[in-house]
Amino acid sequence: MRLEPVRVDRELHEGGPSSGAFYLGDTLEMLPKLVARYGGAVKVIYIDPPFLTGERFAMRVRVGEAGWRASVGSLRLETFCDDSGRAAFLGMMRRVLAAARALLRDDGMLFVHIDYRTHPYLRLMLDEIFGEDNFLNEIIWAYQSGGRSLKHFSRKHDVILFYRKGAKYDFHVEDVMEAPAAPRSNHMRRHVDPDGRVYRSIRSNGRVYTYYDDDPVAPSDVWTDLGHLQQRDPERTGYDTQKPLKLLNRIVRCASREGECVMDLFSGSGTALEAAKLGRRTFVGVDRCPLAVNLVRRRLAGSAYDIVFADAADGGAAPPACEAEVSDGVGFYRVALRAFAPAPGSLPEGVAGLDAVDNWSVGYLRPDGYRCMASFARSRREPALRLELDAPAYDGELALCVGDVTGRSFYYRIARTPGAQ
């Protein structure tokens, strides 16, 4: 059965208990709509903007079953070009930060992740927009990965500027306290209590103070315990500027409570959205790179979320020919994906047929968009493409979505007649 291409501007996923939305589009262009929709409702915003490196960044994409069995992706696709120039960058950030303040609740907080290139400029800009009195921390995230310099001291840290919107804010240091990695080493006397726990004591002003070695401690503003993603880390998605989940978990947990909204205005690999999904259950992300859609479908699996396309989902590309077979079950339809044939030259050399399929789903076309009912995405655990999915009977027109390895999404109406396959 040859399928009929259709255009879709919203993809809806059911699940729970987490929920949210991902917007595929340029952040600057999306800001007015975001403020209109979420203004004054967001508890914490994380921003990891371009760093003014002058470089082009990419994602290493796995292609087909063989690619997913390999240790790294074989296809390198550009995600963004970080060469806008300082004046354009600062103009963009002024608009983003002003919108971030409008998006935050009165007790909301902002984290801006940058490095030495833009730190002094954005610190002054944030003082102006949020107020000097609302500066909370200059967090140093230190790591050991990367090369070494012989011309200056090696640059081994990023800066995260932490601001509140107003004087009344809700910070939860107790939620990010952890047992120390090593026993305390100081001048206090060492003891062991009847349960075998080690503690230290010190007398001061006539009182004795005791501190257990395994008592949780709060992080300081220098974070050396979170590490950096190594090249072969299982957490890696292939996205060049991906940040560790531990880092975003700490930010999300210290600045929000369960059910409060977490927003990432440059969501890239989707780490902040996954941290919010796991810890706070409500999230909003924005990014203009189509490859982010494939990452979102993996990282937010099991949540109730929408993917909103600023433009048509396929970006204007000629829809590939797609073939499927449908059979009736008791209360469901079984859809078998049989062929996917992108036009010659629309994909990188050597990518063709079903190897071009990164993920696919079946669902229904409804007035509010395409409602996904069952989906599959290739993974290291399941690299071979699953060719059959079951969609429970539901209102709307039966449909299918294919996400290809370049991040484009194609939707097809499955026009059925009784008994037809």
Image: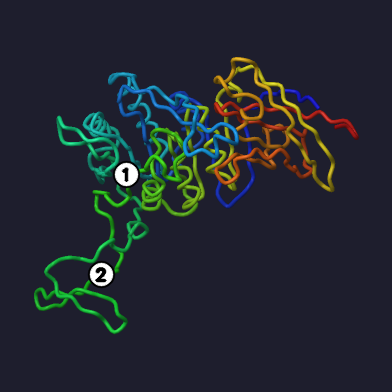
> Mark 2 vs mark 1: which is more N-terminal?
1
* Quadrant for the C terminus in the image: top right
Residue at position x 60%, y 28% in the image: 404
| Up/down of 231 relative to 95, above or below | below
> What is the spatial separation of the Cα atoms under label 2 and label 1, in whole angstroms?
33 Å
Check whether the beta carbons of the residues at disc 2 and disc 1 lie within 8 A of each other: no
* Quadrant for the N terminus in the image: top right
Residue 213 shows which numbered tag? 2
Query: Which quadrant of the structure image shows residue 364?
Result: top right
How far across and how far down the image is residue 96, in percent? Answer: 38, 29
Mark 1 element type: strand
| Residue in front for this viewpoint, 362 or 228 | 228
Which residue is identified by label 1?
164
How far across and how far down the image is residue 95, in percent? Answer: 36, 26
Specify whether 250 is left or right of 39: left
Q: Look at discs 2 and 1 and give the one toward the viewer.
A: 2
Q: Tally the marks.
A: 2
Q: Amino acid at mark 1?
A: Arg
